[in-house]
Image (spheres, grey):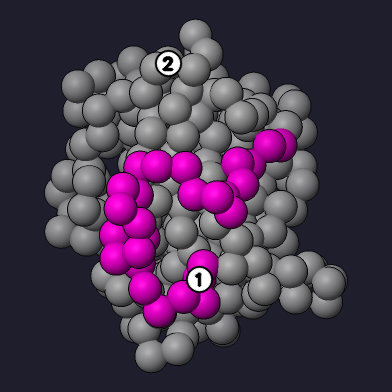
Amino acid sequence: MLTSEEIDFLEKNGYLNLGPLLTPEEVIAVNNRITELLTDEGENAGSELADSKYIRHPKEEGADRLADLVNKGEVFDVFYTHPKVLAAMEAVLGHKYKLSSLNYRAAKPGKGLQKLHVDFKNAVADGGYKVCNSIWLLDDFTNFNGATRIVPGTHKHSQLPDEVMENPFDTHPEELIINAPAGSVVIFNSHVWHGGTTNTTDKDRRSIHSYFCASDQPQQVDQSRYLTQETKTRITKRALEILNV
C-alpha cells in the first residue's frame, strides 16, 4: 500500500501526507454526522475521554471534542480500516498494533493553540515506537485555521519539548504547518513533536484523529468496553482484530 519512498520519508521525518483518501461527498457525509452528534450529545460530547485514565487532557478549552466514533455510525468505519493507513501504522509500530481511540477535534475561532508535545510519557521507549496517529482532514488545513504543526525528525530525539524549549507554546524554528485539502490524511509518528496552532479564522477547523498504539500498550478508549452489538455485527473480522476485541 505504501511505496518504499513513502516509508523512508515517514521513518526519516516522522510524518507522511497520504493525500486525499475521502471524496468530497464523503467529507460532507462525515461532517453532517458530526453535526448530528454534537447536537445530540450536547454538554456530554466527548465524555468517553474523561472516563479514561490514559487521556491527559480530556477537556480542551476552545475545541469541540467527540469520542468513541467506532460506535457512532458506519460512516466512521473507514477511519480505522483503510489499507493505506494500516500500512503506515505497520511501518511505524510493526505488525502488532491496535486502535487506541477514534476521536473528533475542532479548533474554534481564536483558539486551538497547543504546546509542542508527544503522545507518550517519554520520547522513545527502548528505541521502539509505541504510538502513531492519523489526522483525517474535514476542512482544508492552512497556516491560518489552527492546523497541526510538526517538527520533522524529532521522533528520533531523546528529549521532550518541555526539556529543550523555554516555552513549548512558542514557534519552533524547524516546525512546519500541515497544509492540505479536506479529505486528506496525514500520518504522524506520535513521538514526533507536534501541536495545534491558533485558528485565526471565523470558522471551526475540523478533523478526526484515528490513533493507534502498539499491542503492549493500553488503549485510550477501551474498545471492548464500549463496543455495541450493532457495531460488532456490522464490521469485519479484521476490524474486530484492529479494535482488539
C-alpha gap between disc 2 and disc 1: 30 Å
Residue at the spot 53% in from the left edge and 45% down from the top edge: 149
Viewer-nearest residue: 176 or 67: 176
Q: Which residue position is annotated with label 1?
A: 155
Rendered image: mark on residue 24: none
241 is within the stretch colored magenta: no
Please state, as top left, top right, bottom left or bottom right, where the C terminus lies in the image: bottom left
Viewer-nearest residue: 189 or 31: 189
Q: Amino acid at mark 2?
A: Pro
**Looking at the rendering, which quadrant does residue 21 occupy?**
top right
Viewer-nearest residue: 104 or 190: 190
Q: Is residue 149 left or right of residue 127?
A: right
The mark that comes first in sequence, 2 or 1, is 2
Residue 51 in view of the camera: yes
- Residue 128 is situated, as x and y percent measured from the top left of the image, at 46, 86
Q: From what the image shows, is residue 86 above or below residue 71?
A: below
Residue at the spot 40% in from the left edge and 79% down from the top edge: 158
- Residue 173 is situated, as x and y percent measured from the top left of the image, at 55, 50
Secondary structure category for the residue under label 2: loop
Residue at the spot 72% in from the left edge and 32% down from the top edge: 181
Q: Which residue position is annotated with label 2?
A: 109
Secondary structure category for the residue under label 1: helix
170 is within the stretch colored magenta: yes
Instruction: Give the magenta range.
Output: 154-180
- Residue 129 is situated, as x and y percent measured from the top left of the image, at 47, 79
